[in-house]
Image: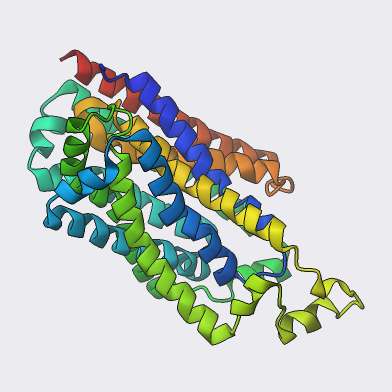
Amino acid sequence: MTPDPVLGVLFHWLGGLASASFYVPYRAVRWWSWEIFWLTGGLFSWLIAPWFFATIQTRDLLGVLSETPGQVVGLCIMFGVLWGFGGLTYGLTMRYLGLSLGMAVVLGLCTVFGTLIPPLVQGDFSETLLATPSGRIILLGLAVTLAGIVVVALAGARKDAALPDEQKKAVIAEFDFKKGIGVAIFSGVMSACFAFGLAAGEPVKAISAAAGTGPLWTGLPVLCLVMFGGLITNGIWCAWLIARNRSAGQWLGRTSLAEARSATADGSSEMAQTPLLANYLLCALAGTAWYFQFFFYTMGESQMGRFGFSSWTLHMASIIIFGTLWGFAFKEWKDARPNVRALVWLGVALLVGATIIIGYGNAMGRQV
């Protein structure tokens, strides 16, 4: 199967849509603490969905993993664990820097590190990127992506600046630039470790292909390993929160005293009506959607030829594009001034343009 960068870009857009949409079902979960619904959905994200889809779409999954060298397995899981730290500290970045600045720093660093570190480590950065016209076009696409991230973040900062004084005070109450920058750098680098884990899993893809798996699906066994690492990090953190908050009973429909008091502050008697079936289904949907971003990522990467590492830039750009569109759908920008809305659309246009540029660079590379 000859790589098709145009198809690859479309797959990455689907992955970005899945990533930007996964949290929507969580918004409808009722009477569950964050650690309960996050771990419930996470079991689908990091364990159930990866193994299910890898089992049905690849050949001899267990045999492939058993043939994989232990060092490769260990590296994939280790980078998954580190990636988990990036996700957990992303929220702290938003707390200390605010949404706009925090997003720009974390996603910018994640994009740069996740895209450029793999070819640097493999020793073919100059030969692959700097020495070829197609490589230089991909670097241009990376630069345009970073510009788009900055523009979207700037629009968000201007939107926040127009908030009423009380809301503005709430937003900046914990602002700490030094602490925030430190956490943001850590989060950005750790989040990029997912790309490192996929790069470390190249031998797994080769073994899977040798077992008869089609080129679109050879990356799925790697996801089983990397996402298991993410399960370790998030599982430990959620377990600690569950023990501290004594929230495990929520899985059975129990409500804490604090939640009961909050729920009945207005005389409501709904606090005992935990919609357990709906909560489990919503978490399953959210968790599976979260997995699908990487499901489509591996499909897109398979179409990018020798510039597969550029998939990370396409992935990040697509997430921001669809995340911004969801922001408009939820009317988060309805009170923004027209020039601010125009600015955020400019950022989206830059990101869309960046995906086209990168796709074009990959198409040129295929013709060489």
Q: Is residue 209 left or right of residue 282?
A: left
The residue lying at 69 percent from left, 39 percent from top is 338
Image quadrant of residue 125? top left
Query: With respect to residue 74, does 107 lie above or below?
Result: above
Q: Nearer the viewer, residue 297 or 137?
A: 297
- In the displayed structure, would residue 362 be above or below residue 79? above
Residue 83 seen by the camera: no
Q: Which residue reaches farthest top?
A: 367
Residue 280 in sight in this render: yes
Tell me if 355 is positioned left or right of 210 in this view: right
Q: Position of residue 336 (x, y in %)?
A: 69, 47
- The N terminus, quarter of image: top left
Q: Whole-percent x and y of residue 257? A: 74, 86
Foreground pick, 5 / 268 = 268
State left or right for residue 108 relative to residue 368.
Answer: right
Give coordinates of residue 253: x percent, y percent. 71, 72
Tell me the residue at 52%/38% (across/down).
17
Q: Quadrant of residue 137?
A: top left
Q: Is residue 6 left or right of residue 319?
A: left
Query: Which residue appears at 64% of the width and 40% of the height?
Result: 341
Residue farthest toward the right in the current orientation of the protein: 267
Residue at screen point 36% across, 55% down? 227
